[in-house]
Image (cartoon, grey):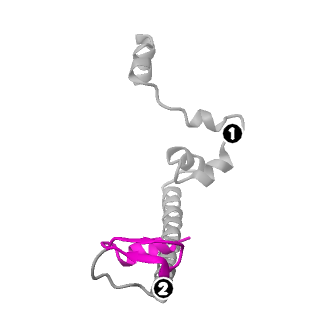
Amino acid sequence: MITTAQAVVSLRPDIEWSMSGDDVEGITWHTQGAEPLTTSEVQAEIKRLEKAEADKVKADQAATAAAIAHAKSLGFTDVMIAVMYPNLGASLWKKYRPQRYSRRLWKRKPLSLKKRLKRPLKLRLALQS
């Protein structure tokens, strides 16, 4: 949802102003020579920004679908896509994630350098290869 303030910033990006309430009549222009906006201009800008936001979401969804289709055409399975690209295959991962694993297991933070160096040398060498 685009607010009136976001539309005013979009229409007049370099002008200082303040607003009381959520209507155009409550705008006080602090920059000299700034032309006041009309309600119809702001409403048109709100519609334009909302359409641009919806178009961006549709484009992102189309790009995700195209990337998944491309990965499948290269021979990757849904599980492989979900594991390799968690953001891309989030919907696939929910479908194939084993129930015995919790989300915390997959979102573990990497060990700090200090904790990694405390591991025995044999284990560190095994993990590097």
100 left or right of 31 in image: right
Q: Is residue 13 magenta?
A: yes
80 in relation to 65, above or below: above
Q: Residue at x 50, y 75 (%)?
A: 4
Extreme residue toward the left, this view: 32
Q: Residue 34's x, y, as percent?
A: 31, 81
Mark closer to the observer (2, 1): 2
Mark 2 crowd level (few <14, some 14–19, many ≥20, 10 Å Cα): few
Quadrant in which the N terminus is drawn: bottom right
Question: What segment carries the magenta color?
Answer: 1-30
State the residue in front, 98 or 74: 98
80 in relation to 38, above or below: above
Quadrant of residue 12 within the rendered picture: bottom left
C-alpha gap between disc 2 and disc 1: 48 Å
- Element on which disc 2 rests: helix
Mark drawn on residue 44: 2
Report the residue marked by disc 1: 98
Q: Is residue 98 magenta?
A: no
Q: Residue 8's x, y, as percent?
A: 42, 76
- The residue type indicated by label 2 comes to Ala
Quadrant in which the C terminus is drawn: top left
